Image (tube, grey):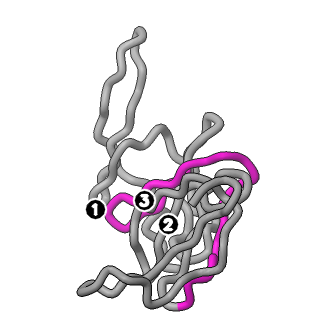
């Protein structure tokens, strides 16, 4: 779909490829699924502002949106990270509520965070402990 016609999420029959269910139309443009977590799909570009939203895979309804500006979500090993406009934060995978502010996170695995730092104009990746609030149960 596109900016004029909107976008929607469809559940496809794996044998035929035909849609079996379809969500309502969203006004966002160029949606991109960035991760599946807790029976939901985090999708960038699903909101009218270009921000990320969580779509419940059982109901195909948006259950959480994050930000009033174009932001991007990423899902790393059970952690949803939203970044943009010079900030990064991990959010609750069900509600989108901020759990902790983060540095420029490029990956996470278990309790380890991989953070990009700039030193003298050179990008470096450092391993750090992931803020434990990012793993808080919903």
Q: Is residue 127 magenta?
A: no
Label 2 vs label 3: CA separation?
Answer: 6 Å
Reply above or below: 80 against 92. Answer: above
| Left/right of residue 30 with respect to residue 117 in the rendered view | right
**The one of 133 and 37 positioned closer to us in this rendering:** 37
Reply above or below: 98 against 118. Answer: below
Q: Residue furthest top?
A: 120
Residue marked by disc 3: 34
Label 1 vs label 3: CA separation?
Answer: 19 Å
**The one of 130 and 73 positioned closer to us in this rendering:** 73
Residue marked by disc 2: 42
Q: Report if the CB atoms under discs 2 and 3 are less than 8 Å apart.
A: yes
Position of residue 30 measured from the top left corner of the image (x, y, whole percent): 55, 52
Residue marked by disc 1: 110
Instruction: State the residue at coordinates (49%, 66%).
Output: 42
- Earlier-in-chain disc, 2 versus 3: 3
Position of residue 56 measured from the top left corner of the image (x, y, whole percent): 53, 82
Q: Which residues are magenta?
A: 59-82
């Amino acid at each position: 779909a596109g900016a004029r016609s909107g976008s929607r999420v469809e559940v496809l029959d794996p044998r035929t490829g035909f849609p079996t269910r379809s969500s309502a139309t969203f006004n966002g443009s160029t949606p991109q699924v960035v991760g599946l977590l807790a029976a939901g799909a985090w999708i960038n570009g699903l909101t009218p502002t270009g921000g990320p939203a969580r779509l419940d895979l059982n109901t195909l309804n948006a259950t959480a949106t994050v930000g009033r500006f174009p932001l991007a979500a990423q899902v790393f090993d059970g952690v949803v990270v939203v970044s943009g406009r010079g900030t990064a934060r991990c959010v609750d995978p069900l509600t989108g509520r901020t759990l902790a502010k983060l540095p420029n996170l490029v990956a996470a695995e278990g309790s380890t965070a991989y953070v990009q730092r700039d030193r003298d104009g050179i990008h470096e990746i450092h391993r750090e402990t992931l803020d434990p609030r990012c793993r808080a149960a919903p």
